Amino acid sequence: MVACESSGTVRDAFLRLGHDAMSCDLLPTDVPGPHHHGSVLDILGDGWDLMIAHPPCTHIAVSGAAWFEEKRKDGRQAEAIAFFMKMINAPIPHICVENPVCIMSTVYQRPSQIIHPWQFGHPEQKTTCLWTKGLKRLRPTNVVYDEMMKLPKNERERIHYLPPGPDRWKERSKTFQGIADAMADQWGVPGSLIPEFTQTTMFHSKSPMRA
């Protein structure tokens, strides 16, 4: 299952390799394909082998730190943290939770891995954190760092320079195709899976295949 995805990018990467994959989001899918239009919390216990989750980052990403105090006071940040933890503690043997640089690195724990689009064929910079369970580290597939550094800053940081608009948030959150393909290629085979964890990672507020 690909949680909190309406684009179908990661879902379709798994489908192309013959996996039984489904996306899930409060929004309908942008392109035809298996999709649960509703809350992921309703289907977490449906026997998934693998979940890749993209929980909303609006209230926990460090890029919005200027509004943290307000969001702590009104409960929005606590709600976002709780949702993130429901994803990482889901009853699923193999899990990847993706987010930008955010407070979960200190509220929960440091990410298992940090990746960039330029490691997967896209000459762009976007720091992406992965918290994983039961999965090996994602291996870069096409490093284009040198080519990227020859580009103007507004091109290699395209996501940052997107103009304001109703769909800006959607474009900023969409998974790069090269990363989606790497997830399907590498995590869709038994050799990239680690035996199921026997102990659930619990959340302490004061402490640091079917897809």
Image (cartoon, rainbow, N blue to C red):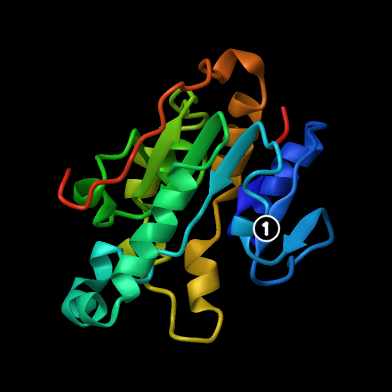
Horizontal side, residue 23 vs residue 145: left or right: right
Specify the quadrant of the image occupied by residue 109: top left
Specify the quadrant of the image occupied by residue 115: top left
Horizontal side, residue 59 vs residue 67: left or right: right
Residue 208 on image: x %, y %: 17, 43
Specify the quadrant of the image occupied by residue 162: bottom left
- The N terminus - image quarter: top right
Mark 1 is on which residue type?
Answer: Cys
Residue 85 on image: x %, y %: 40, 50
The residue located at (55%, 37%) in the rendering is 91
Helix, strand or loop under label 1: strand
Residue 137 on image: x %, y %: 43, 25
The residue located at (38%, 65%) in the rendering is 80
The residue located at (68%, 37%) in the rendering is 48
Crowd band around label 1 with a 10 angstrom C-alpha radius: few (<14), some (14–19), many (20+): many
Residue 170's place in the image compared with 182, above or below, is: below
| 34 vs 186, nearest the viewer | 34
Horizontal side, residue 112 vs residue 121: left or right: left
For label 1, the residue is 24
Residue 103 visible at all:
yes
